[in-house]
Image (tube, rainbow, N blue to C red):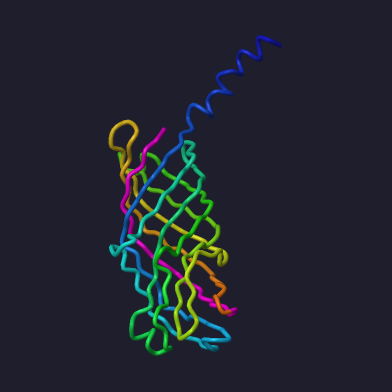
Amino acid sequence: MSRFAFLLIPIGLAGPLQAETELAFHLGAQGAAPGDVRIDDPVAGRDTLGVDWEGRSASAPVYYGLRLTRWSEETGWGVDFVHAKVYAPADDRAAGGYDVLEFTDGLNLLTLNAYRRWPDALGPATPYLGGGIGIAVPHVEVTRGGSVTEGYQVTGPAATLLAGLRLPVGDRWTVFGEYKASWSDNRADLSTGGTLEAEIVTHALNAGVAWRF
């Protein structure tokens, strides 16, 4: 029996030796699809407003993302955080009588993602796909008349899809570029007892760096 156990040792070690953990950071250019905002509030009233959301990725606080992934040879899974932003343009705010309508200290999305990659498919470059589900935790900022709401809330479910290309730089570092789309279905509580509902789709072109350890 001990002889067979000895033979199994390399098999047991193969998985851990091939696995790797990776921490990634990216910036990017992020926008959002137009959508409706539905507000039902005892002070601000009841309204449905069409909004042509703006991303303003480079305006503080900037758009960015962090990702922690556990990889095997071709598949991976991990936690993905993205600090996206959406602003209602001045014309759209004025049409509804809003002074402020935005998620700018983060339309923060936290998802658990799964990934598939194809090593050596394009020479040194590795294409990959990913997707996941999670929650939205935006900083809700709404001001209309006497109704003022500012603060972080867990507002509903979120999902993301991405596709990209990775290129190794040295033994532990990788640079990558990707397209990423995210969806969130938000229901926020207003300070005066009402609610805000908005289904938001963002899209981004990201560039980043990852470190394996």
Q: Could you say which is closer to the camera, residue 105 or residue 17?
A: 105
Residue 206 part of the magenta-drawn span: yes
The count of marks equals 0
- Quick one: quadrant of the N terminus? top right
Residue at figure coordinates x 61%, y 18% from the top left: 8
Q: Which residue is rendered at x = 45% and y = 72% of the image?
A: 141
Where residue 193 appears, as percent x and y from the top left, is: 60, 78
- 23 left or right, relative to 137: left
Quarter holding residue 45: bottom right
Q: Which residues are magenta?
A: 193-213
Instruction: In this rendered view, identify the residue nearer to me: 1 or 24.
Output: 24
Q: Residue 163: x and y, percent?
A: 40, 55
Q: Is residue 98 left or right of residue 79?
A: left
List the single residue furthest toward the top: 3
Where's residue 73, x and y in %? 46, 36
Q: Main secondary structure of the magenta part?
A: strand
Above-or-below relation of 56 to 128: below
User: Is residue 7 depicted above or below 101 in this figure?
Assistant: above
Q: What residue is drawn where x is 41% and y is 67%?
A: 202
| Quadrant holding the C terminus | top left
Viewer-proximal residue, 84 or 190? 190
Asked whether residue 20 is drawn in magenta, I would say: no
**Percent coordinates x, y for residue 188 in the rendering:** 55, 72
Q: Which residue is outermost to the right?
A: 1
Compared to residue 182, the image places residue 123 above or below, namely above
